[in-house]
Image (spheres, rainbow, N blue to C red):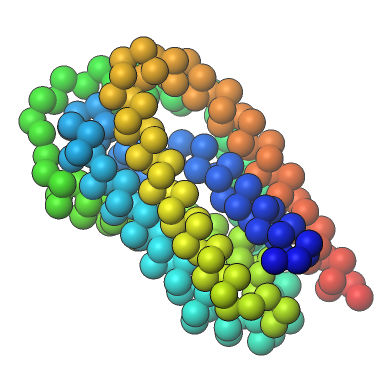
């Protein structure tokens, strides 16, 4: 792996992980399952979400990616749209108020003791990941950085596997961490600030994509 591909890998992997830090629909499901079920059952949600992400990653690399890479105009448009989308996510995160994070406390204090099953939690997680429109848009925006002939298929597959694993490992970490009441309370208090930090980094990444698209379009 040369310096250029290493830089691409670090950039995409960092942006991807930062996005995972920002609470969203998938995150909410993980939290709810973690506080209502045993760890062994809640892991089903994490696996389901990771599997849905893997579907979109595969589509971006195998099908959509090849089509987009063949057109500079389409690539530039997608890069610009992806930058706008990431910037939008950043603005929403920065605009959010502390009261918007009340769902964390409510989820943590839920008294629903009826436990689910691993298959059911997997299906819920997979459905959430597949039906969340942010996921395909987010991966399309990220992969605009590597949809070119200079980056080998092996590198793309490795990056796709890495991101799928990170989604699963991060959600699993949340499940295991939130099984401890003290950690759960600390997280509730820090979620607001975590989202703000994620917003700043995602905003910088989004603006960089927009700038790159505009510069290439003017050449």
**Residue 178 drawn above or below residue 164:** above
**Residue 24 drawn above or below residue 75:** above
Left or right: where 215 falls relative to 41: right
The residue drawn where x is 41% and y is 59% is 53
Residue 45 visible in the shown view: yes
Task: Give the residue at the far right of this rendering.
Answer: 219
User: How many numbered discs, if any?
Assistant: 0
Quarter occupied by the C terminus: bottom right
**Residue 217 drawn above or below residue 26:** below
The residue drawn where x is 8% and y is 30% is 114
Left or right: where 101 falls relative to 78: left
Q: For this rendering, which residue is in front, 64 or 73?
A: 64
Question: Picture quarter containing residue 139?
Answer: bottom right
Residue 73 visible in the shown view: no
**Residue 88 drawn above or below residue 113:** below
Give residue 30's position: percent from left, percent from top: 32, 38
Question: Picture quarter containing residue 92?
Answer: top right
Give residue 186's position: percent from left, percent from top: 44, 15
Quarter occupied by the N terminus: bottom right
Q: For this rendering, which residue is in front, 3 or 46?
A: 3
């Amino acid at each position: 792996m040369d310096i250029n591909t290493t830089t691409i890998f670090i950039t995409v992997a960092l942006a991807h992980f930062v996005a995972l830090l920002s609470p969203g629909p998938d995150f909410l499901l993980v939290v709810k399952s973690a506080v209502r079920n045993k760890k062994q059952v809640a892991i089903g949600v994490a696996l389901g979400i990771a599997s849905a992400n893997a579907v979109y990653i595969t589509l971006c690399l195998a099908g959509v990616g090849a089509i987009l890479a063949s057109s500079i105009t389409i690539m530039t448009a997608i890069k610009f749209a992806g930058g706008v989308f990431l910037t939008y996510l950043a603005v929403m995160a920065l605009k959010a108020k502390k009261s918007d994070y009340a769902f964390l406390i409510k989820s943590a204090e839920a008294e629903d003791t009826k436990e689910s099953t691993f298959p059911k939690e997997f299906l819920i997680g997979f459905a959430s990941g597949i039906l969340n429109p942010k996921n395909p848009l987010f991966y399309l925006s990220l992969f605009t950085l590597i949809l070119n002939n200079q980056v080998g298929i092996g590198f793309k597959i490795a990056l796709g596997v890495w991101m799928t694993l990170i989604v699963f490992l991060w959600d699993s970490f949340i499940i295991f961490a939130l099984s401890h009441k003290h950690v759960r309370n600390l997280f509730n208090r820090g979620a607001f600030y975590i989202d703000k930090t994620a917003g700043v980094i995602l905003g910088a990444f989004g603006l960089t994509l927009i700038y790159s698209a505009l510069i290439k379009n003017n050449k």
